[in-house]
Image (cartoon, rainbow, N blue to C red):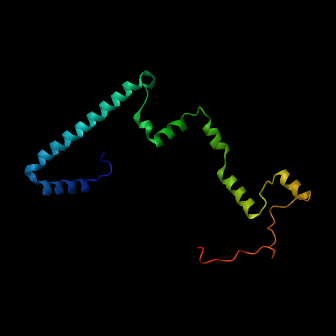
Amino acid sequence: MFNDIGPLELVTLVVLAVLVFGPDKLPKMIQDITRTIRKIREFSESAKRDIRDELGPEFKDFEFEDLNPKTFIRKQLDNDDLGIKEIRNGFDLKKEMAEITDAVHGRESEAPSASSSQASASGSVDMTKKPEKTDAYEHPPFDADAT
């Protein structure tokens, strides 16, 4: 619970508590806080027990920690019933992104497909060339009142 609190922070908290509550009230405050934490834990455990009882015997191995999305995904990735590792290993994101970038910039990729090379050889429209600008297209007039 207090893994990230160092000894210096702990000493500072104790000194601050003594200054705020005083040495007379501090033991009573610590007892009240521990009693409250104990009641909260008991309430939490009884709620978990009630939920498990209501779910029935099908969910005997149900753990509430699995409801955390990170834990759930980690557990599902370790369980390779769906073949997720094969899919992940067969998909090279960097290669796919490089091919898309080359296509957008009009460069040929390392391994062009046969259909695209045949289409450009047969006289079809070459998508890698930029269209020529013509004066036939005019921008609409700017209307300051409309904006």
Q: Residue furthest right?
A: 122
Residue at coordinates 59% horizontally, 77% vertically from top-left? 145
In the foreground, 25 or 4: 25
Q: Quadrant of the N terminus?
A: top left
Residue at coordinates 34% horizontally, 31% vertically from top-left? 48
Residue at coordinates 41% horizontally, 37% vertically from top-left? 65
Q: Is residue 39 left or right of residue 80?
A: left
Rendered position, 85 above or below 7: above
In the foreground, 92 or 40: 40
Q: Residue furthest front?
A: 145
Rendered position, 143 above or below 65: below
Q: Is residue 55 left or right of residue 42?
A: right
Image location (x, y in percent) of residue 18: 13, 54
Q: Residue furthest left?
A: 24
Q: Is residue 19 left or right of residue 43?
A: left
Image location (x, y in percent) of residue 2: 29, 47
